[in-house]
Image: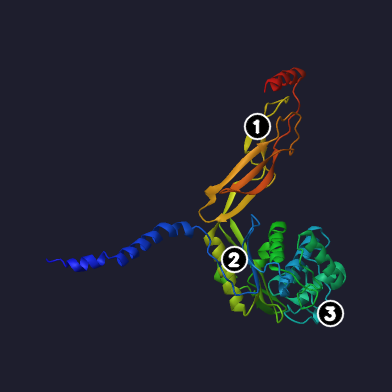
């Protein structure tokens, strides 16, 4: 077998070696870059993706822009209704009188009638599954006497939840110049429903509901397309475009996406799915400490015992780039000297969390137990030790 020496030399030419160099560089560098979430563009006027447990925004665009929320409004209508149920001002089996105003509502309806029996439970399902405007007005009138007063209650709840760029004028989401919200605020509201009313949240996964002989399907198509999706709400008006709030849970992680102002219902479904997949693929949720978990025991003086169990008053979560949770570090700082008595829940220091070289959060460190003072002899002995320490 004869070798072509010139061909071999051409193979190892400067250009060929340059190509090999860049190929090798790509293999060495790409894994490091792959750890960082790539940019994402979504075909919507505004959107946000939030980690439910940490509350952190993973990706967003125009999330604070005030836009018409359309039927996403009904999340706040539901929040007020759920609050009334918890406070026992109404019950699920209560039969609700249907006014002419509710009966004649325009837009999507569950088709209630003035002389036909309907319960609070029926109306809630008609509002959530069928997006019935008539159901919303009937519930508003039941709880507040009028939709105008009910809208005031909605705004009070919005302020309490920190929805700074939201104002409601009705319970349905029908267009009005002073009726607006933002993707950021609506993500807060969706999280609040899941957190505050877990007993009612499963209603948002119901695929269809029948009332008055009419069966209507939930307009959230992701309930059929993605087994991880278990809620929440669609919306549409001419001015608002197609909107969708979606919540999905994969193992212990839950993400909430808000998409506002897409061109079609198919686009809102597709882009919401992309947002959720992006969050699950490129981020992890770290849960370093649980609420009231004993983190360590620290020195205490003049107490009935000389060690104090300490921890945190909340669950701690962080959303971090995929595969980088090991870069999360916690540093504890204690108030010294700690002298008894110590009350349970008393702040005794702080925990500083850092990611890489950057501090990202600080939380109070609390006592997990109460410790009384020691006897007079124990206090005297500790006083001597404290002098030397």
Q: Nearer the viewer, residue 68 or 199?
A: 68
Q: Which mark is residue 229?
A: 2
Residue in view at x 21 percent, y 68 percent = 7
Residue in view at x 64 percent, y 44 percent = 352
Q: Which mark is residue 101?
A: 3
Relative height, residue 194 to residue 41 (above, below): above
The span from disc 3 to disc 1 (Cα, nearest Å) is: 65 Å
Residue in view at x 65 percent, y 49 percent = 361
The span from disc 2 to disc 3 (Cα, nearest Å) is: 35 Å
| Residue 370 horizontal/vertical position (percent) | 73, 33
Q: Nearer the viewer, mark 3 or mark 1?
A: 1
The span from disc 2 to disc 1 (Cα, nearest Å) is: 44 Å
Residue 89 shows in this picture: yes
Packing grade of label 3 (10 A; few <14, some 14-19, many >=20) is some
Q: Disc 3 on helix, strand or loop?
A: helix
Residue 315 shows in this picture: no
Q: Which mark is residue 109?
A: none
| Lower sequence index among marks 3 and 1 | 3
Q: Nearer the viewer, residue 345 or 97?
A: 345
Residue in view at x 52 percent, y 52 percent = 324
Q: Nearer the viewer, mark 2 or mark 1?
A: 1
Q: Nearer the viewer, mark 2 or mark 3?
A: 2
Q: Which residue is at the far left?
A: 1
| Lower sequence index among marks 2 and 3 | 3
Relative height, residue 173 to residue 389 (above, below): below
């Amino acid at each position: 077998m004869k070798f072509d020496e010139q061909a071999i030399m051409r193979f190892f030419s400067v250009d060929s070696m340059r190509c090999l160099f860049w190929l090798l560089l790509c293999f060495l560098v790409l894994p490091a870059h792959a750890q960082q979430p790539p940019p994402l563009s979504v075909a919507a006027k505004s959107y946000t993706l939030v980690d439910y447990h940490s509350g952190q925004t993973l990706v967003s665009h125009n999330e604070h822009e005030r836009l018409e929320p359309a039927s996403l409004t009904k999340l706040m209508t539901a929040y007020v209704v759920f609050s009334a149920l918890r406070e026992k001002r109404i019950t699920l089996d209560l039969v609700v009188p249907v006014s002419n105003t509710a009966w004649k509502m325009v837009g999507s309806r569950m088709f209630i009638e003035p002389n036909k029996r309907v319960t609070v439970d029926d109306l809630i399902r008609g509002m959530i599954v069928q997006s019935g405007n008539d159901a919303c007005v009937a519930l508003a009138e039941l709880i507040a006497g009028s939709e105008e007063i009910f809208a005031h209650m909605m705004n009070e709840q919005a302020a309490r939840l920190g929805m700074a760029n939201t104002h409601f004028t009705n319970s349905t989401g029908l267009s009005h110049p002073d009726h607006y919200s933002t993707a950021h605020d609506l993500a807060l509201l969706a999280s609040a429903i899941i957190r505050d009313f877990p007993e009612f949240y499963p209603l948002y996964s119901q695929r269809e509901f029948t009332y008055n002989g009419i069966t209507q399907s939930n307009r959230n198509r992701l309930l059929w397309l993605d087994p991880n999706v278990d809620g929440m709400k669609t919306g549409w008006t001419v001015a608002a475009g197609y909107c969708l709030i979606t919540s999905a849970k994969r193992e212990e992680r839950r993400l909430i996406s808000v998409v506002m102002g897409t061109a079609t219902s198919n686009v809102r479904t597709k882009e919401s799915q992309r947002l959720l997949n992006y969050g699950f693929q490129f981020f992890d949720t770290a849960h370093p400490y649980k609420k009231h978990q004993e983190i360590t025991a620290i020195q205490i003086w003049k107490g009935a015992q000389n060690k104090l169990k300490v921890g945190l008053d909340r669950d701690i979560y962080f959303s971090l780039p995929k595969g980088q949770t090991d870069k999360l570090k916690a540093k504890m700082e204690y108030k010294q000297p700690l002298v008894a008595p110590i009350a349970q829940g008393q702040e005794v220091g702080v925990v500083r969390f850092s990611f890489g070289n950057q501090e990202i959060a600080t939380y109070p460190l609390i006592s997990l137990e109460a410790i009384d003072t020691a006897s007079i002899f124990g206090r005297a002995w500790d006083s001597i030790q404290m002098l030397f320490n």
